[in-house]
Image: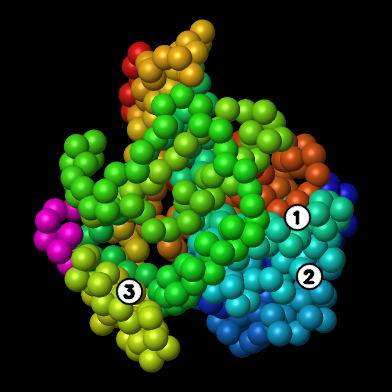
Amino acid sequence: MATRASSRPYQIVVFGASGFTGQFVVEEVARAADGEDYRGQELRWAVAGRSKKKLEDVLSWAADRMGKPQLKSIDILISDVSDEASLAEMCKKASVVLDCVGPYRFYGEAVVKACIENGAHFLDISGEPKFLESMQMKYDSQAADSGVYVVGSSGFDSIPADLGVLFTRNSMQGTLTAVEGFLSLKSGPEGTCLNEGTWQSAIHEAKDQANLKNFRKQLALKPLPVIGKRLKSRGAIFYSNEVQKYSIPFPGSDAAVVERTQRYLYENLQETPVQYVEYFAVGGISSVIKLMFGGFFFLLFILCSCGRKLLIKYPKFFSFGYFSKEGPTANQIAESSFSITFFGEGYSQGTDPQQEKPNVKICTQVSGPEIGYVTTPITMVQAGMTILKEPESLPKSGGVYTPGAAFSKTKLIDRLNKAGIHFTVLSQME
């Protein structure tokens, strides 16, 4: 892997750099190039996409925002997901491809395939379980044979949750067996907003829930063993005394990604599997009413194609302003933040989890800046840096991995702490 990184023209290529998220990933790569990993040496990187003009504009935008005119001279590669030859050419030149082109259910597989066939490691920021799990089913063996690491869900979906559970486990004095996570989002006076691409992915995921269930049935995976007390899910809407807010089950991909990580650690490293459930802390009763009202119409409209077209055409209206074609303003990004608070329980050393009640509790937290265009670029780029800088700490062979499976033995959490995403132990008691 070290030979590959040094022999290829570019250590990192940002594919889809002119997209809404891609432009912020470009900025983050530029920051990483000036970081301690590359003091005294140069990070070789490039941007890739369909339009040279748009890529030039993104580099100029980043150069002006960061006060780094040299960014305007970063190399540009022309590559299109519909053109296999252009993808292959891009992947042959890269050690790591950061794929920012979504929705991944439509555009992701071609890039995964090109990376594996041409020896480039692959990272995406997908929160789409069907895509993520189907890539593992279809390409894990081929990626392993090629020595290529394919690591999905390397953005806000789902590095904070996945590595947060591992951080909780590693911080506990004893054996962690169950964790409840509570996601809270904070915003300033202007509120919060995400670009319409995330909204479109959510629409397609909601429409495809039945297919996802059937797909998982076909996999016929054995249930992970439950060690200690079984963790029970709470109601559809409930008041959480832990975070003092009304909460709902989090509809994102985090829990599924964590489960895949725990399966890998149990089956390959014989580590005790941790049960995980995640909730979204909505707020007060007015927020609950607003959510129920919006959720009802969302679920109603996704049932037919005309309804889905309306949802896609008018994201701002149907999401109460949480998604828009324009995306967030600079103030909205600057004033937004997140935290996931983890409440874990387990057993002290020498206690039999099958005979006793849990006797150790721990509370940890992962917190950071705005989720879509600050945290996501940080996690994606730092994951890429980990592949480049810590190959000896990755799993022994390539393959398709979750972040927790790929990076459990690395210093990625330390890297994230330095980059502004903080992992903290709040309390621990026996």
> For the residue carrying disc 1, how many other residues have a C-alpha within 10 Å: few (<14), some (14-19), or many (20+)?
many
Note whether 17 is above or below 238 in the view shown. below
Q: Is residue 73 visible?
A: no
Q: Which residue is mark 2?
A: 114
Relative image position of residue 210 (x, y in whole percent): 49, 68
Which contiguous range is marked in magenta? Answer: 283-290
Residue 328 occupies which quadrant of the picture?
bottom left
Please say if the residues under marks 3 and 1 sit with CB atoms less than 8 Å apart: no
Which of the numbered marks, if any, corresponds to residue 140?
1
Figure quadrant of residue 217 = bottom right
Mark 3 Cα shell of 10 Å, populated few (<14), some (14-19), many (≥20): some
Lateral position of residue 207 relative to residue 90, left or right: left
Q: Quadrant of residue 189?
A: bottom left
- Which numbered disc, 2 or 1, marks the residue closer to the eye? 1
**Disc 3 to disc 1, C-alpha distance:** 34 Å
Element class at badge 3:
helix
Q: From this view, report whether residue 344 is shown above or below residue 1.
A: above
Q: Position of residue 191 (x, y in %)?
A: 23, 65
Mark closer to the chain start, 3 or 2: 2
Seen at 18% across and 41% down, the residue is 244
Q: Position of residue 156 (x, y in %)?
A: 47, 55
Callout 2: SS: helix
Tell me which label, 3 or 1, sits earlier in the chain: 1
- Asked if residue 286 is among those painted magenta in the image, a careful observer would answer yes
Query: Residue at 86% across / 55% down in the picture?
Result: 146
Residue located 18% across and 45% down the image? 239
Name the amino acid type tagged 2. Ala
Residue 327, label in figure: none
Q: Are marks 2 and 1 in contact (CB under 8 Å)?
A: no
Distance between mark 3 and mark 2 Cα atoms: 36 Å
